[in-house]
């Protein structure tokens, strides 16, 4: 995996975490774990506290102030990339509001860890992703995993992130760790790019549109670049794990890689123009390197 580390992202994590704790008036010394984990959990605490304040729920609001890590020590499970929180919320109880086009879940006083079998699935997925070279990406940008709907191999799997909860991934899942690892990497890639754009103060023009073969429509440069970053990450991952798979999983991932090759090839004319909208040269180079590697597969 090409080096994706940006010092400015680490600084962003530390600064935002400090600011959120100041807003909640919590003790900075209560931070636990890595700066990436603290950053992710701080956003859950902020979102939960804001929601509680809006409804006048002082009990829940006070809980977030005294639990800025959202009770992480009781929820963390060990993985190859460090302690992670894996939950399996009832999808009918997930939140819908103006902050996101998709449903989301916020860690809170009633949060319970996912059942043991789902924790084992997630742990195996983190191991698979780590061994394929994506340990840093998963460690810093996939801290909380919300497993949603179980589906058989071959069904459409839906996953997403929301900008208000960086470091959190929402995803459907099968019984196959290799597939969950692919989707964790894809969504962690979205979280990384959101952080990187913020940390480098890059504002992408909303007037430029490019055809996205994944959506079969023209999309703003922001969405186009996100797709041309996260899908190549999954292509690189898939090419690396294919030799280690067999049977139905092997055939599924091989077909996925073939499909992605064709889709990515359809972006080669537009990608340089979209990439030119990234003002920061270091970030621009990171995006180009991953794109070029995926294109060569």
Image (cartoon, rainbow, N blue to C red):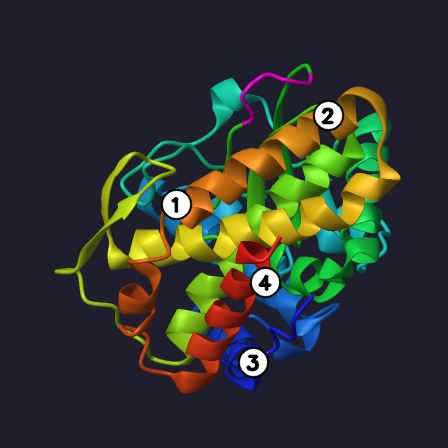
User: Magenta segment: does it hold 156?
Assistant: yes
Q: What is the x, y in percent for residue 106? A: 52, 42
Q: Mark 1 points at which residue?
A: 51
Left or right, 129 with respect to 211, comes to right
Contact check, label 3 and label 1, Cβ < 8 Å? no
Name which of mark 2 and mark 3 comes first in the sequence.
Answer: 3
Name which of mark 4 and mark 2 comes first in the sequence.
Answer: 2
Q: What is the x, y in percent for residue 209? A: 19, 54
Left or right, 201 with respect to 180, comes to left
Q: Mark 3 points at which residue?
A: 6
Name which of mark 4 and mark 1 comes first in the sequence.
Answer: 1
Q: Mark 2 points at which residue?
A: 251
Q: What stretch is highlighted in magenta?
A: 153-157
CA gap, disc 4 and disc 3: 19 Å
CA gap, disc 3 and disc 1: 32 Å
CA gap, disc 2 and disc 1: 45 Å
User: Magenta segment: does it hold 62?
Assistant: no
The residue under the point 75% across, 51% down is 84
Name which of mark 3 and mark 1 comes first in the sequence.
Answer: 3
Q: What element carries label 4?
A: helix
Farthest left residue in view: 207
The residue under the point 61% across, 48% down is 235
Disc number placed over residue 81 in the picture, else none: none
């Amino acid at each position: 995996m090409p080096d994706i580390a940006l010092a400015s992202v680490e600084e962003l994590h530390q600064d935002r975490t400090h600011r959120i704790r100041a807003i909640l008036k919590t003790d900075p010394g209560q931070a636990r774990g890595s700066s990436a984990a603290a950053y992710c959990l701080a956003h859950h605490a902020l979102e939960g506290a804001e929601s509680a304040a809006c409804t006048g729920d002082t009990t829940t609001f006070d809980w977030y102030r005294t639990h800025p890590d959202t009770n992480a020590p009781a929820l963390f499970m060990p993985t190859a990339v460090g302690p992670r929180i894996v939950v399996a919320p009832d999808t009918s109880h997930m939140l819908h509001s103006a902050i996101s086009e998709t449903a989301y879940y916020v860690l809170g006083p009633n949060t319970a860890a996912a059942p043991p079998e789902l924790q084992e699935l997630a742990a195996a997925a983190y191991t698979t992703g780590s061994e394929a070279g994506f340990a840093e990406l998963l460690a810093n940008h996939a801290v909380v995993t919300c497993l949603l709907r179980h589906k058989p191999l071959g069904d459409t799997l839906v996953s997403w992130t929301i900008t208000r909860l960086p470091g959190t991934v929402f995803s459907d899942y099968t019984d196959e760790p290799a597939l969950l690892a692919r989707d964790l990497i894809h969504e962690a890639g979205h979280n990384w790019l959101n952080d990187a754009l913020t940390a480098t103060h890059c504002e992408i023009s909303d007037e430029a549109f490019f055809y996205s073969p994944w959506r079969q429509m023209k999309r703003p440069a922001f969405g186009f670049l996100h797709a041309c970053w996260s899908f190549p990450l999954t292509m690189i991952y898939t090419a690396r794990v294919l030799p280690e798979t067999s049977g139905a999983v092997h055939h599924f991932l091989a077909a996925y890689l073939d499909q992605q090759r064709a889709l990515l090839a359809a972006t080669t004319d537009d990608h340089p123009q979209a990439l030119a909208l990234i003002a920061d040269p270091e970030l621009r180079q990171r995006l180009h390197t991953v794109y070029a590697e995926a294109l060569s597969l």
